[in-house]
Image (cartoon, rainbow, N blue to C red):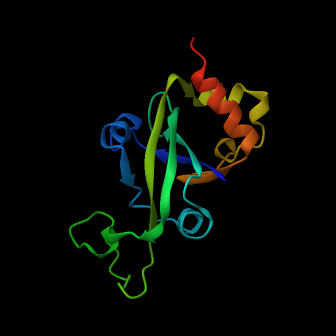
Amino acid sequence: MRYWLFKSEPDVFSIRDLKRVGREPWNGVRNYQARNFMMKDMRDGDAVLFYHSNARPAGVAGMAKVKGEAYPDKTQWNPSSEYFDPKSAEDKPRWWLVDVEFVEEFPHFVSLDELRAEPALEGLLTLRKGNRLSITPVERVHYERIRAMGRARK
């Protein structure tokens, strides 16, 4: 099993939205490195930290899991979608996605400031200056620490 951190703006799609729908395609990713993580590296059952980005505060709100294998993101062929890509052909898709399934909303939202202040999270890709990827791999030790922080009641 691998561990991942997925970022989403909570006013677009939050952990509570995922809880409400249960399972959702993670569409609209238009970065090649993030796409490659989904297309080549993710497997059914991989663990996901659900991160609220562009929020005050930003941070990890809960957990999800990858459900199934990667498949083409249909929004790339829909001219009315903000994720439409006229250069992508159906016989050679450019953009892929995975489905994510809700696991839990943390009782304690783990803010970006808390993540930065935690010595055990040194090396976490999301904390690196200049990292703006919406999907990043997470080391198991970092995943376990963030999960413990989120489950702690304050």
Number of callouts: 0
Q: Which residue is drawn at 77% across and 43% down?
A: 123
- The percent coordinates of residue 46 (x first, y second) are 59, 52
Question: Residue at the bottom extreme?
Answer: 91
> Which quadrant: the C terminus?
top right
Q: In this view, does 39 lie above or below 15?
A: below
Q: Left or right: 150 with respect to 100?
A: right
Q: Residue at x 39, y 60 (%)?
A: 27
- The percent coordinates of residue 70 (x first, y second) are 49, 67
Question: Residue at the left extreme?
Answer: 80
Q: Residue at x 66, y 53 (%)?
A: 2
- The percent coordinates of residue 33 (x first, y second) are 59, 66
Picture quadrant of residue 38: bottom right
As rendered, which of 122 and 3 lies closer to the eye? 3
Q: Left or right: 20 with respect to 97?
A: left
As rendered, which of 147 and 93 lies closer to the eye? 147
Q: Is residue 61 above or below residue 90?
A: above
Q: Residue at x 61, y 18 (%)?
A: 152
Picture quadrant of residue 116: top right
Q: In this view, does 89 lie above or below 124?
A: below
